């Protein structure tokens, strides 16, 4: 069921502290993010995929410092971030929409949840993919590590994966079946 974000209704969160999860994905304890990541403890992350009125998804280019790729820039199909203590995955999605794309007030849908191994981009994470409702709002990249952006359709997305594998991240293949589902 879609939900429309309202920042004022969100509970207070503890920045820099994340919830460590048990094997079933339920909160076990909270600890500083850096400490949890060094120990490769399971935690929640979210991917927020922005879609335009035609259902095309927004790719944004991350600079080498923010891409997680030592080779240079990478095109990301979603804003990615950790859920902080006291924050819902949905609340994290709202925060990321604002922080990365400069957007608020767009409905979010939960498309999928999948586990990433300890060696993955997000570490040992349970990742929820959130899709925005189709919108005509133009993103304003606010993340200092993002330098450019473009909307692409399914065929363009697949062509980038095929022809420029060095510019994509492993999350693409995990989330691809869900990007254009609705």
Image: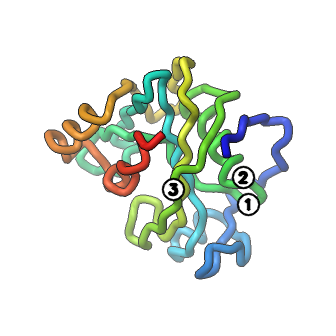
**Closer-to-camera residue (159/13):** 159
Give the x, y percent position of residue 100: 55, 34
Up the image or down, 3 lies above or below 54; here it is below
SS at badge 3: strand
Q: Which of these two is toward me, 32 or 96? A: 96
- Which is more foreground, mark 1 or mark 3? 3
Q: Bin the neighbour count of mark 2 within 10 Å (Cα to Cα): few under 14, some 14-19, many 20 and up.
A: few
Helix, strand or loop for disc 1: strand
Pick whichever, 57 or 121, lies toward us: 57
Which sits earlier in the primary sequence, circle 2 or circle 1? 2
- Disc 2/disc 1 C-alpha distance (Å): 7 Å
Q: Which residue is mark 1?
A: 85
Observer-side mark, 2 or 1, equals 1
Query: Where, by quadrant of the figure, is residue 43 drawn?
Result: bottom right
Q: According to the image, label 3 marks what residue? A: 112
Residue carrying label 2: 15
Q: Of all residues shown, which one is farthest toward the left?
A: 163
Left or right: 17 in relation to 6: left
């Amino acid at each position: 069921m879609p939900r429309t974000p309202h920042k004022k209704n969100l509970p207070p969160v503890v920045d820099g502290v994340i919830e460590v999860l048990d094997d079933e994905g339920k909160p076990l304890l909270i600890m500083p993010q850096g400490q949890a990541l060094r120990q490769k403890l399971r935690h929640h992350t979210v991917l927020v995929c922005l879609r335009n009125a035609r259902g095309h998804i927004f790719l944004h280019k991350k600079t080498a410092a923010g891409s997680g790729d030592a080779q240079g820039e990478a095109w990301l199909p979603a804003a990615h971030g950790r859920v902080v203590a006291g924050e819902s995955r949905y609340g994290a999605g709202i925060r990321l929409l604002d922080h990365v794309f400069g957007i608020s007030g767009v409905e979010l849908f939960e498309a999928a949840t999948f586990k990433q191994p300890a060696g993955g981009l997000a570490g040992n994470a349970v990742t929820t993919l959130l899709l925005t409702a189709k919108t005509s709002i133009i993103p304003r990249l606010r993340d200092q590590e993002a330098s450019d952006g473009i909307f692409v359709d399914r065929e363009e997305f697949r062509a980038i994966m095929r022809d420029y594998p060095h510019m994509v991240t492993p999350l693409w293949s995990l989330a691809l079946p869900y990007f254009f589902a609705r």
